[in-house]
Amino acid sequence: MKFSTLLQKNFYPFFGPREISSFAKRQLRTSSPFLSTSTFHIDARLTKSPLFPFPYTIYRSSNKTSKPQCSKINKCQEVSTIEHIPSSHSVLDFLDKPFSTPRNSLALIHGASGVEKHTDKFISTINDDKYFSISCGEDSFFRRHDSLGVADGVGSWRNVDSLIANSALYSRKLMHYAYTELEKYTDIKDINPTEIMQASYEQTIRDCTLEGIVGSSTALIAVLRDDELRITNIGDCGICIIRHNSIIFRNEEQQHSFNYPFQLGIFSYDKPKDSQEFKIKIQKGDIIILGSDGIFDNLFEEDILEEIAMSQRSSLKVDPQVISDSLAWRAKAASEDINNISPFQSRAMHEGLYYQGGKRDDISVLVAIVA
């Protein structure tokens, strides 16, 4: 609330000219260490305000300086003199500055769901004591009030017998360190999700080298700053933004060839600098869907929109957890249906490959509503 509004609502009915003058002096002394009661006053003889029925004059600082004053640590500072300026505007215009507010005016209300490919049970989305990320098979993800991330560990490392392969741990560390990097930022305006991914990648490589573990993972990080969603993606994780029941943004997969995505790992030539970057203007009420390829390989865009519409009809309010649960369950059912025409099947046929039905995979989905 602005100072003028606060003063008018809470103080003006009880203030007279003398009290207003005293109050203004205190405000100026607070905002400027070099002003004192001897250098500021309100003269009730010259001008009038539509808000305050008594006349006044405002005095303010000029660029002229007087003798320097020295502090206790013997550092001299120039002290401004006071310049007389008659004013026909309210004294509150001079004092009126909004109180400090958080930089982000928008935030994310989120839900998350995950189903491993070898089970029909939802995973727990409660963080344990060791990691800030959640594990879902070889998928991992994190969520905050201002950012979301998902990683999909590359499962083909299981076929390498001579190495200690653990893509599930690799992806979990990647998302864990992304979360901890985001926690370090106090100046949130200048944050770059690609730099977050780079720092997370370096720490994950360090850990896996020390522990003798190999693995690789795709990854996607989205960070909300004011009304802008900043996205960095490497590989085949997906994100879409829905506004008024229409998809206004959907990223494309990064593939070296069919089913061979870009990925971050010890033996991979791909690096965070190779990732896609997007900046999308968003609005209050937008719905963000973010997930591993287990969602987007099994559900078309119209399937996602239909599931969101059904979730909204069954509830008086839009609940991100209800939407994420329904999307995860529908993708799980589609992945096990051999007669289902899936996006993965369509892409395989486009490459001249025979494939039928959905794709069995770990399924991780995060849903956030901009509020």
Image (cartoon, rainbow, N blue to C red):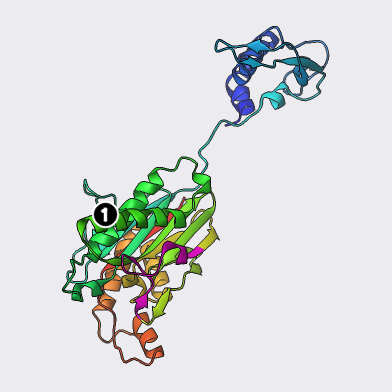
Give the percent coordinates (x, y) of residue 160.
20, 74
Camera-nearest residue between 315 and 258: 258
From this view, report whether residue 155 is shown above or below residue 145.
below
Camera-nearest residue between 19 and 84: 84
| Residue 341 is a magenta residue | no
Camera-nearest residue between 295 and 172: 172
| Residue 276 is a magenta residue | yes
Q: Residue at x 53, y 47 (%)?
A: 190
Give the percent coordinates (x, y) of residue 194.
46, 57
Residue 317 visible somewhere in the drawing: no
Q: Which residue is mark 1?
A: 207
Give the percent coordinates (x, y) of residue 91.
72, 21
Give the percent coordinates (x, y) of residue 14.
61, 13
**Pointer 1 local density, CA inside 10 Å: few below 14, some 14–19, many at least 20:** some
Residue 14 visible somewhere in the drawing: yes
Q: Quadrant of residue 221?
A: bottom left
From this view, report whether residue 269 is shown above or below residue 128.
below
Q: Quadrant of residue 148?
A: bottom left
Camera-nearest residue between 218 and 19: 218
Q: Residue at x 38, y 68 (%)?
A: 237
Quarter of the rendering occupied by the N terminus: top right
Left or right: 75 with respect to 278? right
Q: Quadrant of residue 90?
A: top right
Callout 1 secondary element: helix
Left or right: 39 with respect to 320? right
Residue kind at label 1, given as amino acid type: Asp
Range of the magenta residues?
A: 259-277
Q: Residue at x 25, y 82 (%)?
A: 337
Left or right: 70 with respect to 151? right
Q: Count every numbered label the image shows and give the total.
A: 1
